[in-house]
Image (cartoon, grey):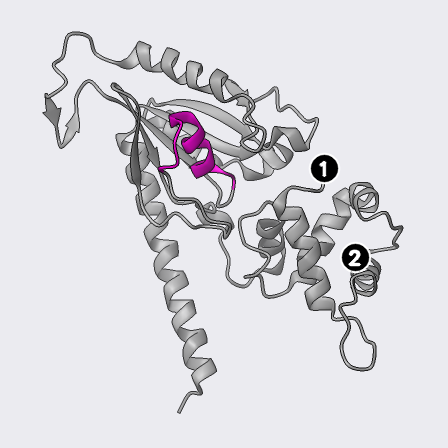
Amino acid sequence: MPTKKQARSSKMLRNARKQKNKYPLLLLKVIDVSDIVLEVLDARFAKEMQNKEIEKLIEKKGKKIIYVLNKSDLTRKDEKRLNPRVLVSCRNRRGINELRDKIKIEAAKIAPKGVPSNVKVEGRNYNRVQVGVIGYPNTGKSSLINLLIGKSSAKIGAEAGFTKGIQKLRLTENIQLLDSPGVIPTEEYSMTSEEKIAKHVKVGGRSHNQVKDPELAVNAIVKSNRKNLEKFYKIKFKDSEDLIEKIGNKKGLLKKGGEVNSDRAARIVLRDWQLGIIEV
């Protein structure tokens, strides 16, 4: 007879498998009905967050893609190899007008002329350009849509993967935005690979509250961002273990006997990282 904890873990695993199967199908549907696709990337990790398999599909279907590099205020990087691209910051409301104008310019090239607005084909307005918004979980897709349309219509959550289905929102009379759930590329998805999970946490694809081994994820961040972490926390450290130890002592995250609660301390680092308050 399984314990309550075992039953709960089994249910969570089944749900995760269902979502893994469901989300790519929704993503494929968004791409299929879209005329233009916005791939939202975290400007700090644009290369790591590109969904190459989906980009190939978009190209194969002859759809227009625009790369949107969000959180550009947190880095000096500019992925010039990605074109067309627009650098934005949802937090600072920067680049939104430029992106909106870019969408309208591309939509004008696609929209058929002289078709009545009430004409529909397969349930959609024939003269309405569909713009799909895709990307990893927690890249700010819903926040971006809300800024583009000028009101809070797209649901926003602090947890990765908050959007549960396709939301249709009007940008203009002839342009409709489709907000899709954040999806980790199929080839990278894993419930067990520590290396892949650490990467997903680093780029915000998995929440700091959900990851099983936060110390491993902190180690992945330390490898490429030591100086940024030292500058932010105003401490010097030898490795990720030393960083976690010092953060734990600094914030008083101690167990009985004075031992540092490394799990809590590591999650503090991951939380700060995912909130985007550590500049890269």
Secondary structure under the numbered disc 2 in the rendered image = helix
Residue in the picture at 80% in, 62% down: 241
The answer to which of marks 1 and 2 sits earlier in the sequence is: 2
Would you say residue 270 sits in the magenta stretch?
no
**Furthest residue in direction bottom, as rendered:** 1
Report the front residue among 150 and 57: 150
Q: Horizontal placement of 63 versus 197: left or right? A: left
Q: Quadrant of the C terminus?
A: top right
Q: Residue furthest top?
A: 114
Mark 1, residue position: 279
**128 or 145, which lies in front?**
145
- Residue 46: percent from left, percent from top: 59, 33
Circle 1 crowding by C-alpha within 10 Å: few under 14, some 14–19, many from 20? some
Q: Residues within 10 Å of mark 2 (few under 14, many from 20)?
A: many
Amino acid under disc 2: Ser
Number of dots carrying numbers: 2
Q: Amino acid at mark 1?
A: Glu
Residue 246's spot in the image, x, y percent? 84, 60
Q: CA distance from mark 1 to mark 2?
A: 18 Å
Q: Which residues are magenta?
A: 139-153
Disc assigned to residue 240? 2
Residue 223 horizontal side relative to residue 198, left or right: right
